[in-house]
Amino acid sequence: MCVARILQQNCVQCHHAGGIAPFSLEDITEVKDRAKTIRRVIEQGQMPPWFAAPVAEGAQNPWANDCSLSARDKADLLAWLSSADRPIGNPADAPAPLKFTDEWSIGKPDLILQLPNPFDIKAEGFMPYQFAVTETKLTEDKWVTAYEIMPSVREVVHHVIVQVHEKGSTARARDEGAGGFWAVYVPGNARQIYPAGFARKLPAGSTVSFQIHYTPNGKAVKEQMRMGLVFAKTPPQQEVKTFAVSNNRIAIPPGASAHVETQSRHVTFDIPITSFMAHMHVRGKAFKYEVTSADGKTETLLDIPRYDFNWQLRYNLKQPRLIPRGSTLKVTAIYDNSSENKANPNPAKLVKWGSQTHEEMMIGFFEYFTPVSSAEAAMPLSAESEEALRARVVALFGALRAGDIAQCIELSDPAAVKKHGKDKAEQFFKSISDRARLAKLAAGDHAIKSITAGNDGKTARVEIQVRVGGQWRPPSTDVWALVGSAWCYQETLPK
Ligand code: HEC
């Protein structure tokens, strides 16, 4: 047994000088000084911070970034902490200390985006979400293979949601990534390095917005963060994206100790998922991701039985999980609005959706990828059949706007309608149609941006842009269901 090894593998990445944790555990005397607290947090499962339900015995652990202690390490560490003398052993046997740098851990960035002005962080109390925008000034599209978010004062940054806004679209502070995010900073996870062939797109002329949750920490400081980006040397095969299943109609009654809200989304496109992140505020108690396949089998993808607002963790899969077209994704959130919840600012209040911490949110983020439209990935279509597909999609838009559900079904892939049943298809188009009309899209206000081959080579993906306030942009959350590229317009190619 080697206590130093256990701490290095599970604690020191955060608990080092200058790290995100409030104290270092690099030196064994520091550990001995805090033995009692350490024992408590380990016994209570509070540290290391990992909140997914434990993997069933004998089952494979699907998580790439599971930082929880193995049963053996936990027992060994607790035994040592409880021992009378807490022996240090022979220092020569200890592993070499880990090295940490203040520099970029992703390598030298090709572009560093810095927030235009520092934020003033108060010494005490509570701060509403801050919002800042920076221009990329890029003259051509770039593929980003790694990013790292580097606060100037790490201790006061709780989490950051970064979004990219295509040229001409406006960055708005209000939605906190309810439709997805481009990059994220969460405690213990400031960067992302994508595997070879995978990248995120940063379009020419785009702007980047940062939504930042600061937590004052005893000393007034100025904080000005940067994001470092590494560009791909060769074009990637897969584009990494994020989508969200969110529910902005939540209403949590006063005093409720386990109020349940759910939201489902039908998947009309094969979607390989690589990572999850659940977002609620201080009344969040538990969160679950499930998938129901077309043949009715339900499986849990991620269960967070004890959600903790302080830890907006990402849960990264070792292997992408393919969710086949025809499945339904469901997220379930449980809230504790009772006085038993120590973090609850006001148990007497009916709580609804809002970005401030005294309001609530319910967002299940999914990270996934789709093939990049390159020469090889381009759909093997003749010009005529692409024209035909275009015409069909345009007609489908018309039918959706008109609320002509029968016509929508007529224009969709007959095999898909047969597979899911006509009732399901009706339900699906009805909900999209309602939203299309809600978004008040006029006939000329959407355009097909690209048509690319689906993952299976038999289907096509139609990417849409919408015109809002006279400007073209990718779909916002309001019209997402209508035009969401990965969702509605997966069309079977005409033979
Ligand atoms: C992902 C980063 C991370 C990892 C890994 C991590 N910690 Fe922490 N730890 C923190 C942060 C941040 C805090 C302060 C916030 C809090 O208390 O929740 C903290 C707080 C603590 C505290 C004080 C808790 C209290 O109630 O006062 C102890 C003790 C602790 N950690 C021990 C450990 C040990 C032991 C490990 C490894 C077995 C570990 N931590 C792993 C980030 C981490």
Image (cartoon, helix red, strand yellow):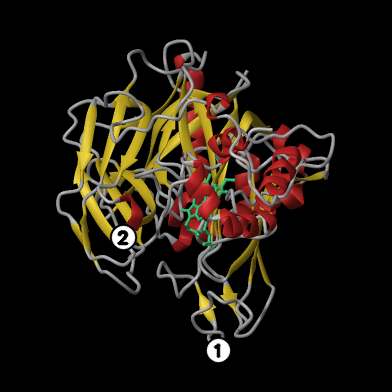
Compute the Cα span from label 2 to label 1: 28 Å
Toward the viewer: 80 or 426? Answer: 80
**In the figure, 125 relative to 139: above or below?**
below
Asked if residue 173 can be seen in this view, the reply is: yes
Q: Residues within 10 Å of mark 1 (few under 14, many from 20)?
A: some
- Amino acid type for the residue under numbered disc 2: Ala
The numbered mark at residue 348 is 1
- 300 relative to 374 in the view: left or right: right
Please identify the quarter of the rendering in which residue 251 is found: bottom right
Q: Is residue 301 visible?
A: no
Residue 386 % position (x, y) = 48, 22
Q: Report x, y in % for residue 186.
A: 44, 48
Quarter containing the N terminus: top right
Query: What kind of residue is marked 1?
Result: Ala
Q: In which quarter of the image is the C terminus?
A: top right
Q: Which of 358 and 432 is in front in this view?
A: 358
Q: Pointer 2: what residue?
A: 173
- Image quadrant assignment for residue 239: top left
| Residue 276 percent across, percent down from the top left | 57, 44
* Residue 20 placement, left or right of 393: left
Count of picture labels: 2
Mark 1 Cβ inside 8 Å of ligand 1 = no
- Closest to the camera, between mark 2 and mark 1, is 1
Q: Where is residue 195 in the image (x, y as percent from the top left)?
A: 49, 22
